[in-house]
Image: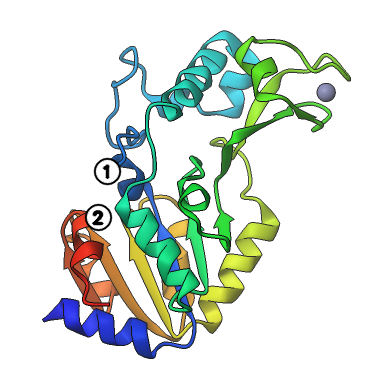
Amino acid sequence: MTNELLSEWLQSSNSTVILTGAGMSTESGVPDFRSTSGWWKNIDPRTVATTEALAQNYSLFHEFYKMRIENLEKVAPHEGHQILADWEKRGIVSLVATQNVDGFHQLAGSQRVEELHGSIRSIRCHRCEKAAPIESFLHKESCVHCGGKLRPNVVLFGENLPQVSWNNAMEAIRAAELVLVIGTSLEVYPVNQLPMMTKGKTAYINLDIAHHAVQFDLTIEGKVKEVLQQLPL
Ligand SMILES: [Zn+2]
């Protein structure tokens, strides 16, 4: 019943924004680095993905991101990513805003994507901000321009969100007729404020909807890929 209703909304909406989170990527085999504390060396990733670790414990910081970048070679977008890319081609979706840094939406074919937490697939110098090859980072080299530390273009705890992406997502969500939130526990501020900025309808697909059901006009509990596959669109 809710499946049919969401399909109707998606078909009738003139501007739909999708907001995705970790649940989208965990179904590809990417570890959710918020909820599974201790999955890596019994260290809470939230203490490593920080500006403090970058400055004071670079070896650990580097090892953590090297492992995450190398992990990406073993995983790939799943059919759920492809369904969203297909929706964009068919004019059903205007924009995908994502908290994920793995680039899977683009790999699956989505072209209008705002990466709210940056991308782990590109590297820059933390000091002079010049781009560097990913291999230089993996080999733990310093910046060839200034000798600074290399880092992925992700938003670390303690850093601001990329302003352009954030503004683009916010404006699209404000103007949207439908905002569909997929696979995020909505724990991370300020991204968790985005869905409520719209005057349009709101829908939520997640493995666990318990904490947020009342905030949305429509909710579907389940695995992201399965729910998207079962939508009659
Ligand atoms: Zn530099």
Q: Nearer the viewer, residue 92 or 25?
A: 92
Left or right: where 61 falls relative to 162: left
Cβ atoms at labels 1 and 2 below 8 Å apart: yes
Of the numbered discs 1 and 2, the one sitting upstream in the chain is: 1
Looking at the rendered image, the quarter that the N terminus falls into is bottom left
Position of 77 relative to 72 (above/below)? below
Disc ID at residue 225: 2
Disc ID at residue 27: 1
* Residue at left offset 36%, top offset 71%: 180
Quick one: which residue is furthest to the bottom in this view? Answer: 12
- Label 2 environment density (alpha carbons within 10 Å; few <14, some 14–19, many ≥20): some
Is ligand 1 closer than 8 angstroms to the Cβ of mark 1? no
Q: Quadrant of residue 28?
A: top left
Q: Position of residue 111 (x, y in %)?
A: 57, 60
Q: Nearer the viewer, residue 25 or 168?
A: 25
- Element under disc 1: loop
Q: Nearer the viewer, residue 69 or 129?
A: 69
- Element under disc 2: helix
Ligand 1: image quarter? top right
Q: Quadrant of residue 3?
A: bottom left
Q: What type is the residue that disc 1 sits on? A: Glu
* Residue at left offset 39%, top offset 51%: 21
Position of 33 relative to 113 (above/below)? above
* Residue at left offset 57%, top offset 75%: 172
Q: Quadrant of residue 217?
A: bottom left
User: In this view of the protein, can residue 190 be seen by the observer?
Assistant: no
Q: What type is the residue that disc 2 sits on? A: Lys
Left or right: where 188 falls relative to 219: right
Q: Position of residue 190 (x, y in %)?
A: 50, 57
Is ligand 1 closer than 8 angstroms to the Cβ of mark 2? no
Looking at the rendered image, the quarter that the C terminus falls into is bottom left
